[in-house]
Image: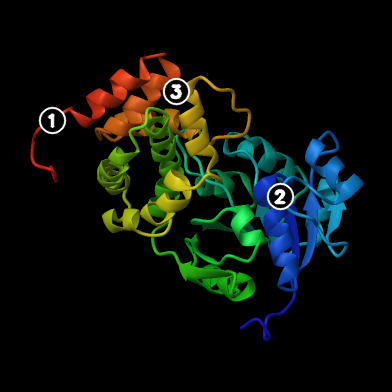
Amino acid sequence: MENQRKSKNVFVLGCGRWGSFIGWYLDSIGHKVKLYGRESSKNINRFMETRKNDYITLPESITLTTNLADIKTADYVVVSVNSQNLSEVLRKVRELEVKDKTFILCMKGIEIETGKRLSQIAEEILDESNNVAVWLGPGHVQEFYRGVPNCMVIDSKDDNVINEIIEDVSSNLIRFYYGTDLIGNEIGAAAKNVIGIAAGMLDGFDLSSLKGALMSRGTMEISRLITAMGGKPSTVYGLCHLGDYEATLFSDHSQNLTFGRRFVTKEPYEKLAEGYYTVKALKQLGEKYYVVLPITEAVYRILYENKDPERELDKLFQRSLKDEFI
């Protein structure tokens, strides 16, 4: 597949940890990559000075740019920004009258203000001539960069778009599966960050042995929400949720895990933990679709209502003695 791959022009919108890695990865398998950041971005300025960040070194073959209009030369537009900023970013793209591109969203989250999935936001804002897909699943930049392979998922409403992207981006380093449930994959991918924060809190209280129960209850909780929203209940057991638990609930590279642990040990943590925002959106979705989400609600109370973390977690695991699968 790699020998037959045709080189594509790729514009990576967002030069943070994940966006810069994807730029590096797509360049390494033969695509022509432009990595974009705003002029005020510390990340793009650091790359322009040193071509390095804390995780990777970019080759000279990757073009660095602060000109959003460069997006017009792309076949693929890879988007990797804070999920709560996606609407604002895509409105700026729309002003450039960008058409006939394939946008690949490489982020996990739900917009708090609207409760919408990220692909919904992109489809509503972008010109209808553009395709929208998502690139989701487990993996850390640090592991990929040192050559450790993993499996991920591409999903879209259009099967032809999925097929084309997978043919163009698959390699021995990242093996891609075909997504068949856009709702389930997006909700599952976003929700695992909330479960990751809960896992970090358990670690902080030296209660890591409860992670097995957390995973069991977490998958069932999110499966109920996915089903209520029109997705497939089995999707929660795929790569975008349960398949991402190892990377999110156990790895020292997990920002959500580290955030949860440091929150309860009262240590500062300044890196982005998407689950902090996602839990607010998930709670709203649970209320909208009449789905009880005990883990989500416990994490929300701890983070937003200043409830005692140890007490909330204790209540969570003692909340009922009913049948395990009810």
Q: Position of residue 251 (x, y in %)?
A: 49, 47
Q: Position of residue 270 (x, y in %)?
A: 63, 28
Secondary structure at badge 2 equals loop
Residue at point 58%, 34% (across, down): 84
Secondary structure at badge 3 equals helix
Farthest-out residue, left: 322
Residue indicated by mark 3? 264
Q: Can residue 251 be seen in this view?
A: yes
Q: Say which quadrant the C terminus sits in.
A: top left
Q: Which of marks 1 and 3 is in front?
A: 3
Which picture quadrant has residue 32?
A: bottom right
Q: Position of residue 191 (x, y in %)?
A: 41, 42
Report, in whole angstroms, how far the alpha carbon at label 3 lies from the one at label 2.
27 Å
Categorize mark 2 by other alpha carbons within 10 Å: few (<14), some (14-19), many (20+). few
Instruction: Give the mark nearest the N terminus, 1 or 2.
Output: 2
Report, in whole angstroms, how far the alpha carbon at label 1 lies from the one at label 3.
24 Å
Residue at point 68%, 85% (across, down): 3
Q: Say which quadrant the N terminus sits in.
A: bottom right
In the image, residue 233 sits, relative to residue 249, either above or below, namely below
Which picture quadrant has residue 81?
A: top right
Instruction: Give the mark nearest the N terminus, 3 or 2.
Output: 2
Q: Nearer the viewer, mark 1 or mark 2?
A: 2
Report, in whole angstroms, how far the alpha carbon at label 1 lies from the one at label 2.
44 Å
Residue indicated by mark 1? 320
At label 3, the amino acid type is Val
Residue indicated by mark 2? 55
At label 1, the amino acid type is Ser
Tell how many labels: 3
